[in-house]
Image (spheres, coloured by chain):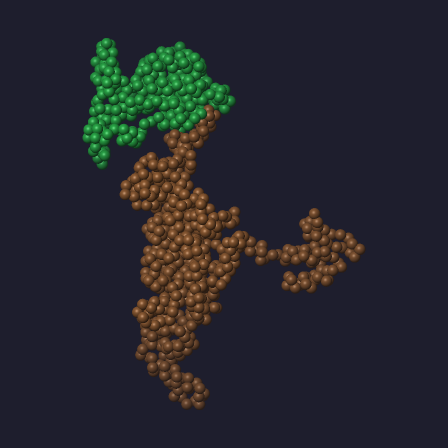
Amino acid sequence: MLALDQGLQELLITVNSLLRDRTQNYPRRDAIRRYLREKIGTLQKRAPLKIDALRALADGRPLIGVDGSVHSYGTVFPHIIYCFRALASASTLSVEKGISRVDLFYPEMADHRREIEEIISQAAAGGEELAPETAAARAVRQRLAVLEVQVAMEAVNKYQPFAVLFDGGFLRYGGLAPAQWQEYRELSLAKDVVSIGIIEEIGTFDLARKVSAGFPEASPFSCDRELLFGILKKGEWLAVKEDLEFKKTYYTCFARPGYYPGAVAYDFFQEQTRRAAEFVPLLFGLTPQGGRGIPQWLDQVDAAVRITRGEMELLLASGLDRELRERLFVSQRERRTL
Amino acid sequence: MQIVGHTTQQVVYAASRRRPFRINELLLIEDRIHSNSNPLGEVVETQSFNRYIPLATEHSDLVDRQVMENLAQLGYDIGADTIHLARIRILAELASPVSVGIAVRVPTFAEIRDFLIPRDPATGLVLGVIRGTEELTVGLPAQLSRVALLYQKDSGIMPQKGIPYIMDHWTWPEYPHIGIFGGSGSGKSFALRVLLEELMRQQLPGLILDPHFELSFTEPFPDLPASYREDFTRRSIVLMAGRDVGILFEELNAADLINLLQAAGEVTENMNNAIQTLHRRRDSFVSFSTRIRDLTRGLEEEQDLKRKLREDDGDGFREKQEIRRILGLVEKYKDRVGHVSTLRAISRRLNRLQTERIFTGGIEPIREAIMNRRLVVVQGPIWFLQVLGAYVIRKFYRERRQYQDAEQTGGEAPKFPPFIVATDEAHNFAPRSPEIPAPARSILRTIAQEGRKYGVFLILATQRPALLEDTITAQLNTKLIFRTIRSSDLEVIREETDLGPEEVRRLPYLGSGNAFVSSAAVGRTIAVRIRVAKTVSPHSRHPFLELKEDFIPPEEELGEALLTYLPLGDFNFDVHLGTLQQELKRRITIEEITCCLEDLVGEGIVEKKEMVLGVEYRRRED
Ligand SMILES: Nc1ncnc2c1ncn2[C@@H]1O[C@H](COP(=O)(O)OP(=O)(O)OP(=O)(O)O)[C@@H](O)[C@H]1O
Ligand SMILES: [Mg+2]
């Protein structure tokens, strides 16, 4: 379509005016900052990371980055193949030389079908009706989380790191891979390894709710992400008071490491709450100022673990018969673009 | 090293973790499908990068340095994830694309010999070294080693690193003519010199028009190893236009003359007729120009002269006779030569040629050199060379054609050998724009189009290929392309050669002496470094070096000379004064000498001693 669709444009304008009304009615930035300081915690400025401090923190041990990736092939359930890969890389080696594990999920395989059925019956016990597709999706998420925790555990044993960075918050691991996560938690605490979950897309509401309660006249914030946008200054972090306990058993703080005005969040195990003050400056020092707020090393692990479309195609071409591929997995839609 | 990514029949990518690729290097692709002969490829683009470190982020165009330093503190080595990537052009025609994953390796010399060496150095033109073959010299036979030494301005003569680039001139009848293109200082003249040296080695006769007065071959290139030197003094001759060579007026016919005059200005139809009418066989410059002058006078003063003739004032018999002669000319030509202004115009053009000394000497020395299979370099101002060149080339080409036609038809014609015509600034001899008068353009175009049939070949060097006559450009089957910056020239190169986009992109950055050779005979582009020349232009010295060597200040010169006469003193000044004056070709006083010696004492070169016989200066020893 060459010209902008006028109808759609008008509809969008109504959305915009709705949003504008609401944001105009938000509390002012300095009011929010004052509230944060009084009720939530302290706003701390970035302290430059001294090489000595960095060395003392690491004490000759590496940093580990953990990430996972899943790529699906096919469009119509159950003929969808999911390929998983998780990677835990130590900063002392090439990213690709990290510990990696792969897995595959295909709802038609007996084991996997059983897994789906189990999820469905578990949900039913809690009074929830799950469609097989939804159950499969949960199985997929669980597998990925399990895989990531497994490589993290292996890496802790093998490399004796001083810290492990996860791409994403801790709630996900605790929810999707509870047994493995518990094991990891005990292991890392015993070995004095500091674990940090780096959250790029903050998905929580607690902070927003609490702040909004402090400003009954103003429009309420819908989520933490919206609340924190543009509130922190560059190189500033919000050290949330220990007793607030937004997430049970985890400690979360918020930060703006670079130019991007949005905030990221860092999850720690509650037992290591006190380490945040040491580690936030490290995280700042490892995060490109112009980037999206993710430490460089984690970004590199992310790039290395990703199963690209090209790689997937090569894998499928070498592993699956062409005829089967055509019959079961290639959609009409894809054929059209091929 | 192995093939990665998408491949086609012509282009593949190869990746390597350990070994960076070199531009232009040749690699062997170990293809199972095409296994009877593994295809060769040439690296046309290289890249090394760390695939996990983004080049650009949203706000900074470089990786955050501080972050990288901190990561380094945690043990990270950026080099660890570096990947070397090469775009490789396949130098063969494949029926199907190369498969991904196939190994790539550096070939051995034996595997590429036939591909890279069309002839051995004894029978081909050794112009330089093929770039990217540096690693392939293991196993290079002796007759291919040390035949193309290299040169670098700062480091001097360097060994031949790589396989020699040998141009096969035996293919010229099929793929004739050479173009040498490149911007100022890119190495054209240098390459032309090397090419000409090779022609001499093969004893190919050639006529070189040298508007820069730089192509003589008597001075050896400095610091060449003895084994590499070569003496070209008897294979070449330099002639000065207007002194050693020119055009003998007596040998011109009317058509030749008209051609020549065109170089001095437009020749109209009327002028053309007038010359046809007035020129006689074996006319000398004097006889012809006098005829025109007299006729002009006759036409202008006809009535006057007739009256003078009638008046019987008893004045000189000779003058009357003169007047009669002039009126006779008027009688004879009046109706056939048009207006006086036509004659005037002819005179002006004639005089211009005469004052430029075009009619001094003849072309015999050139002919003789060509017949003896020598290289004859004619030096002179460019305009002169255009006129003389046009004349000589046209004449020789005609003779060559007549001889060869006679050979074929069994007729009789004097022997004339195949020959080569070479020139720098070719766009002046054959400009593209038809508005610019250029006497040599049409004959050069003719040779470009059909010279190969007669064994007549062109070598044309120019800074401005965009300004060179385009039919000629299109006929240059081999082009040596040096650094080129101007977009209009790049455009011509893009159109007229098989240089790929990667090569065209590199053209503005080529170092002096590096070229791409695009050759119809070879069917692909070869990156070449031109070898060191064995001779130098007599005036290739740096002007400041020339100052230092040829314009020594008088006192310094005296000082140099005095050092050879030491010890000196009051006792022998007068003994040496005479020879000293002869040596320096000027008057010198004793005072000047003592003064100069005192300076040398001050510089610590000479020491001064009081002796019995007075002061003595001697070389200081230490
Ligand atoms: N093959 C070569 N090897 C080493 N150096 C070279 C080579 N060719 C040229 N050079 C260097 O570059 C300089 C300029 O080269 P050259 O005189 O041939 O340029 P050019 O293209 O003829 O320039 P112009 O158009 O101005 O006459 C030389 O004096 C020499 O120092
Ligand atoms: Mg030059």
Which of the image's four quarters has the C terminus of chain A?
top left
Q: Determine the image quadrant of residue A36.
A: top left
**In front here: B92 or B139?**
B139
Colour brown, chain: B
**In front here: A34 or B440?**
B440
State the image coordinates of residue B593 (x, y, percent, origin top left).
70, 58
Which of the image's four quarters has the N terminus of chain A?
top left
Q: In the displayed structure, would residue A154 be above or below residue A319?
A: above
Q: In the displayed structure, would residue B67 be above or below residue B554?
A: above
State the image coordinates of residue B131 (x, y, percent, origin top left).
42, 46
State the image coordinates of residue B171 (x, y, percent, origin top left).
36, 56
Q: Determine the image quadrant of residue A23.
A: top left
**In front here: B130 or B560?**
B130
At a point 37% along the width and 43% down the height, the residue shown is B42
Q: In the displayed structure, would residue B72 be above or below residue B508?
A: above
Label total for image: 0
At a point 21% along the width and 17% down the height, the residue shown is A131
Q: Does residue B456 appear to the left or right of A333 in the view shown? A: right
State the image coordinates of residue A42 (x, y, percent, origin top left).
42, 16
At a point 41% along the width and 75% down the height, the residue shown is B250
Q: In the displayed structure, would residue B241 be above or below residue B87?
A: below
The colour of chain A is green
Is residue A154 visible from the viewing direction of this image? Answer: yes
At a point 33% along the width and 39% down the height, the residue shown is B31
Is residue A238 visible from the viewing direction of this image? Answer: no
Q: Determine the image quadrant of residue B465.
A: bottom left
**In front here: B120 or A28?**
B120
